[in-house]
Amino acid sequence: MLKFLLNHQEVSTSLPTGTVLLDYIRYDQHLKGTKIGCREGDCGACTVLVGELVGDQLRYRSFTSCLTPLGNLQGKHVVTVEGINQQGLNPIQQAMVDESATQCGFCTPGFVMSLAGFCLSEKEATCQNAVAAVDGNICRCTGYKSIERAAARVAHLLEARNGEEPATFVAQQQILPEYFAGIKPRLQALAGEANSNGYGPDAMPQFVGGGTDLYVQKHETMRELAAQFLFDHPSLQGVTQQGNRCVIGGAATVTDLAESAVLREYFPEFRSFLRLVSSTPIRNMATVAGNFVNASPIGDLTIMSLALNAQLVLSDGNTTREVPLREFYQGYKQLAKTPQENITAIWFELPDARTTFNFEKVSKRTHLDIASVNSACRLTVTNGFITAASLSAGGVGPTPRLLPKASAFLVGKEVSEALIQETAELAQTEISPISDARGTETYKRLLLSQLLKAHFLALFPQLNAAELLR
């Protein structure tokens, strides 16, 4: 029996844990403000907030309920648009009205919930951050300028927060209902409740992390499928520094990476790279291990981690072993793991001051899109010479690719336009792209060459860009 808070009430359900939250909200609880749109996490019409205790802090994040299994909600606070209603319009809703930011209204609850999530976050109260909060929401009729103006008004509401806990502040300021101020002790009371995974001791369960791709592929079958939910497992979470290693829990999300103090210290640009990965709600849900196991040839986190020489820690519950990520992919969607194993952790060595890192991606849209081709680059330069190099690429073969020949070719050489040209030409011998919906073989080969050059232009701005890109 699952128990969690739904808006201001405690609820329990014996529905299969694989049931998606969207169906539970609409068909079991009859809360129809959360809309059914794409059922793929793209449109944002079904956006809700999920609050949970992280240590002694109450943290809210926006989720797409169409991809959220009930099994990931034990002991949490789920907020739908009905849960932020007041006697009149709340200030977020009023901002949407005042700026004419709604027309047909179908997408509006999603936008409102994403902005409510911004109000419940600790992000700086800027227009830029407020607009970024709705990057997973699509409006097909109003146009976005009016929504951006509404977001700016919402950001203005938070300027007086001064470090106060967000849930307390929004309740006191009547931005959201008063009951938000009492959610923390209610979740503390729910803590420790058992979460049934819904499978017997002899079953071979499907491991589920965030479910952001699994529920797109197998929406109907996942409801009844025996599943072991890993999203909230304490030993699989967190991003920590252990000696000279960065250790990432298998259930750490993309947002966890973006907010990691360790990654901010050693990779100052890493957060900007992660903004190219899907949208805010999906980043809040998608796990690192899930990205790897999905085995997409263009997985952004996979391509980044290949260049970082990441190592995977696999466990079947009894034994643990390590596998280099570069050896994990044995063919298209074929992995060097048994069905009983899951990724418990990922680690890589942290760089010193001589090492730089860059990520590049080309897609039809800058944000909320999968890559046509993506690439990452890690270089160590000593006294002007490259002493270590690692280049990776996605979208140019049946698996995510490390480029060992091109990487080795760079070592021992001084950075120059001619060296980069030769490296790009050598990389062409290591790839086997095909023509598909994201581009022709010729186009993808051209993209990889340009992305490799883009790495060096980003890391060595003194290079002659005109000569390199001609």
Image (cartoon, grey):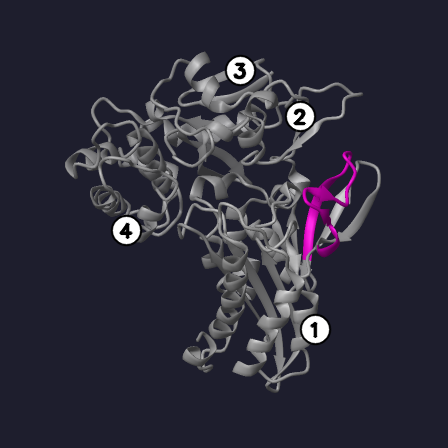
Whole-Å distance between the Cαs marked 1 and 2?
A: 43 Å
Magenta stretch holds residue 334: yes
Instruction: Tell which circle, 1 or 3, labels the residue nearer the N-terminal end.
Output: 3
Q: Which residue is mark 2?
A: 227
Inspect the image, locate mark 1, and give the three-letter code of the amino acid beneath it: Ala
Is residue 431 or residue 97 the one in the foreground?
Answer: 431
Query: How busy is the neighbourhood of tag 4: few (under 14 within 10 Å), some, or many (20 plus)?
Result: some
Inspect the image, locate mark 3, and give the three-letter code of the amino acid beneath it: Ser
Whole-Å distance between the Cαs marked 4 and 2?
A: 41 Å
Range drawn in magenta: 326-347
The residue shown at (61%, 79%) is 381
Disc 3 to disc 4: CB gap under 8 Å: no
Magenta stretch holds residue 413: no
Is residue 107 or residue 371 the one in the foreground?
Answer: 371
In the rendered image of this protein, does residue 427 appear above or below residue 461?
A: above
Q: Which residue is mark 3?
A: 12
Disc 2 to disc 3: CB gap under 8 Å: no
Whole-Å distance between the Cαs marked 3 and 4?
A: 38 Å
How many marks do you count on the picture? 4
Q: Position of residue 323 (x, y in %)?
A: 77, 52
In the rendered image of this protein, does residue 386 appear above or below residue 307?
A: below
Whole-Å distance between the Cαs marked 2 and 3?
A: 19 Å
Which circle marks residue 408 in the picture?
1
Q: Is residue 382 left or right of residue 212?
A: right
Q: Which residue is mark 4?
A: 127
Instruction: Tell which circle, 3 or 4, labels the residue nearer the N-terminal end.
Output: 3
Task: Give the image quarter of residue 74.
Answer: top right
The residue shown at (29%, 36%) is 139
Instruction: Tell which circle, 2 or 3, labels the residue nearer the N-terminal end.
Output: 3
Task: Give the image quarter of residue 27.
Answer: top left
Instruction: Tell which circle, 1 or 2, labels the residue nearer the N-terminal end.
Output: 2
Which quadrant is the N terminus positioned in?
A: top right
